Image (cartoon, helix red, strand yellow):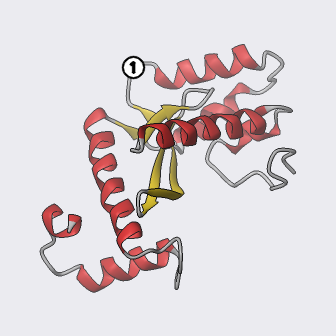
Amino acid sequence: MNRLTNRKPPKRAFAAVFTIAEGYEHCIESDLYGVRQAAEARDIFCYRCPFGLLEIVAPVFRAEQIIGYIMVGQGVMSEQMQDQKIIDRLLSLYPDIRHPEKYRNCLSSIPHLTQQQLDSFIVMLKIITGYVESNELLLFPPKTIGQLTKNYIQKNYANKITLDELSM
């Protein structure tokens, strides 16, 4: 149980870090930082968690007021030696880690993104956020966002869909 949120740590690819005494608290603090930055910018904010993993937060608006956030993570940029940099950072924060290989194994299951893929993902996130806002899904969620997304894809799979159509 987390002392900040009274929730159990989520099941995430890099969840092994939550077994470290302060690891989960570091993640929550990082997410709160991301939310504050997105709120201040009033736009999608992309950042790295304390360990170097990529995280993205998008504010959701209604009548110019932020009513919630869509948070996306975890990712790793496909930079040279990035996995090793993340392990090195983890070991510098927590020198008592006994089995760094379990963290290496976790990293292999996290999507590795090029800058072009990240840029494309941010465009998609803007479209998704716009859809959530225009349909007021955070106010009256008839189904989960995942269910609605799946339904939309199934319904429109055979149709030609352009970014212009999705942004309307």
Determine whether, in the image, residue 97 is placed left or right of residue 40. right
- Measured from the top left, where is residue 14 in percent x and y? 64, 41
Residue visible at 62% across and 27% down in the picture: 51
Dot 1 alpha-carbon crowd within 10 angstroms: few under 14, some 14 to 19, many 20 or more: few
Q: In which quarter of the image is the C terminus?
A: bottom left
Image: 13 above or below 155 = above
Determine whether, in the image, residue 64 is placed left or right of residue 167. right
Residue visible at 70% across and 44% down in the picture: 15
Q: How many marks?
A: 1
Q: As shown in the figure, which amino acid type bears the numbered disc 1?
A: Gln
Determine whether, in the image, residue 90 is placed left or right of residue 46. right
Closer to us: 1 or 90: 1
- Measured from the top left, where is residue 122 in percent x and y? 33, 47
Where residue 119 sits, quadrant-wise, is top left
Residue visible at 44% across and 39% down in the picture: 45
- Measured from the top left, where is residue 109 in percent x and y? 54, 45
Residue visible at 47% across and 74% down in the picture: 137
Closer to us: 79 or 57: 57
Closer to us: 62 or 22: 62
Image: 63 above or below 97 = below
Q: Identify the residue under disc 1.
A: 80
- Measured from the top left, where is residue 4 in percent x and y? 82, 45
Q: What element carries label 1?
A: loop
